Image (tube, helix red, strand yellow):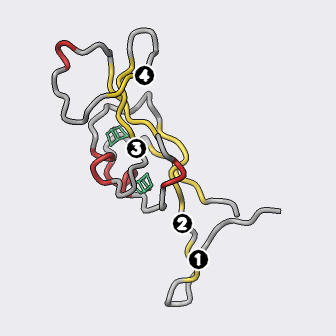
Amino acid sequence: MSTTFSVTLPSGATWTPTFVAALNEEKCIGCGRCFKVCPRGVLELVGLTEDGERIHVDLDDDDDEDAEYEKKVMTIAHQELCIGCTACAKICPKKCYTHAPAAV
Ligand code: SF4
Ligand code: SF4
């Protein structure tokens, strides 16, 4: 049987952190704001090609003119590293993120 992961704060209150669960690539504009605030290296910016292929893209790569991809999107590359700070969701202008409690 699994229970929801939660912690007891010094105040005695219970806090249930929520961790990154999904990122809506349809809504994402690839602005990179979430990447910059994530303290854990969870996220990765990729370029989507015409054929739906994913290629690595540098955040500072503004050279979209010659780009081999059609669109830049953020992806969750290392979900297991998330500490549930929710900074990514707070800064995202397109509300792409879904966070959820963890089961233990
Ligand atoms: S919740 Fe925090 S640690 Fe997790 S992906 Fe978002 S910014 Fe990174
Ligand atoms: S902040 Fe939101 S819109 Fe910008 S790259 Fe991250 S998920 Fe996409």
Dot 2 lies on which element? loop
**Label 1 sits on what residue type?**
Val
Count residues near mark 2 (Cα–Cα under 10 Å), then give few for <14, some for 14-19, many for 20+: some
Q: Vertically, is 27 above or below 65?
A: below
**Residue annotated with mark 1:** 7
Image coordinates for residue 39, horizontal then vertical, percent: 35, 58
Count residues near mark 1 (Cα–Cα under 10 Å), then give few for <14, some for 14-19, many for 20+: few
**Label 3 sits on what residue type?**
Leu
**Label 2 sits on what residue type?**
Pro
Q: Of the two numbered discs 2 and 4 on the same chain, state the one appearing first in sequence.
A: 2
Q: Of the two numbered discs 3 and 4 on the same chain, state the one appearing first in sequence.
A: 3
Specify the label residue 40 is tagged with.
Answer: none
Q: CA distance from mark 2 to mark 1?
A: 8 Å
Q: Name the side, left or right, on which 57 lies relative to 54.
A: left
**Residue annotated with mark 4:** 54
Quadrant position of residue 51: top left
Q: Are marks 4 and 1 in contact (CB under 8 Å)?
A: no
Quadrant position of residue 31: top left
Q: Of the two numbered discs 3 and 1 on the same chain, state the one appearing first in sequence.
A: 1
**Residue annotated with mark 2:** 17
**Is the residue indicated by label 3 positioned so its CB lies within 8 Å of ligand 1?**
yes
